[in-house]
Amino acid sequence: MSSVKDYFSNLGSGIVSLFQGLTVTGKEFVTPKITEKYPENRETHKYPERFRAILELIYDEEGKHRCIGCGICERSCPNGTITLQTKMVDTPDGKKKRKLDKYSYDLGSCTFCQLCVTNCPQDAIRFVNDFEQAVFTRSKLVKQLNYLPEPAEPELTPEQKAAIEAERQAKIEAAKKLAAERKAAAEKKAAEEAKDSEQSQNENK
C-alpha cells in the first residue's frame, strides 16, 4: 500500500516540477531579445571604454609611434602573444640606435590581461573596442602592428656635422696623447727597473 502511495506522490511532485520548468521556459518565449538588433545597430551601439578587443600600436598624426623596442611587453605576456624584432641603425651623428623592425601580435592566443599595456614604459600600445575580428584561418589572427613605414632619421645641419667631426678629432687626439703618456711611463719604469737590477748585481759582486 505504501509503495502505491509513494508512486503517486512522486508522480505528483514530478508533474509540479515539470510545470515549474515549463513556466520558466515559457517566459523566455515572450521576453524581448536584446541580441536581435546586432549587427544592424553596430553604427550606434556604445561599447564600454574599458572593453578589451584587440591590441594596437598608437600612432600620432605624423604617423610616428612611441615604441622603442625595449621588449618589456614581450616579456610581460604570459602566453607569448607578442614577438618583437629590432634592428640597429646608424644615426646621422655616427652613433648606433635600436629601432623597432616588426611588432607581431597573435590575437588567437591573447588572454586580454593587459599586462603589456600596463608595463609599457612609453605608453605605446593600447586595447581598442573593435571586436569584429572573426576570420576563417588562424594564420590571419597574427597581425603586424607597425604597419606604417618607419620615418627616416633627420639630417644634420652643416654646423652640427662640423661640431661632431671636431669632437671626434678631439677624442682621437686625446687617445693618442694618453697612449703616448702611457708608453713613456712604461719606458721610464722599465729603465728604472733595469737600473735597480744592475745596482743589485753590482752590490752582490
Image: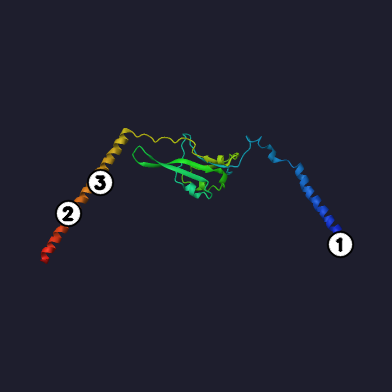
- The answer to the question of whether label 3 and label 1 lie on touching residues, with beta carbons closer than 8 A, is no
Marks 3/1: CA distance?
Answer: 109 Å
Precedes in sequence: disc 3 or disc 1: 1
Q: Secondary structure at mark 3?
A: helix
Reply above or below: 158 against 188.
above
* Residue to which mark 3 is pinned: 175
The C terminus lies in which quarter of the figure? Answer: bottom left
Q: Residues within 10 Å of mark 3 (few under 14, many from 20)?
A: few
Residue depicted at x 47% and y 48%: 72
Marks 1/2: CA distance?
Answer: 120 Å
Q: Residues within 10 Å of mark 1 (few under 14, many from 20)?
A: few
User: Which amino acid does the dot numbered 2 rest on?
Assistant: Lys
Precedes in sequence: disc 1 or disc 2: 1
* Residue to which mark 1 is pinned: 3
Marks 2/3: CA distance?
Answer: 20 Å
Reply above or below: 37 against 114.
above
Residue depicted at x 26% and y 40%: 169
Q: Secondary structure at mark 1?
A: helix
Reply above or below: 146 against 80.
above
- The answer to the question of whether label 1 and label 2 lie on touching residues, with beta carbons closer than 8 A, is no
Q: Residue furthest top?
A: 158
Where residue 98 sits in the image (x, y, percent)?
Answer: 41, 42
Q: Is residue 108 visible?
A: yes
* Residue to which mark 2 is pinned: 188
Precedes in sequence: disc 2 or disc 3: 3
**For this view, does 199 lie left or right of residue 82?**
left
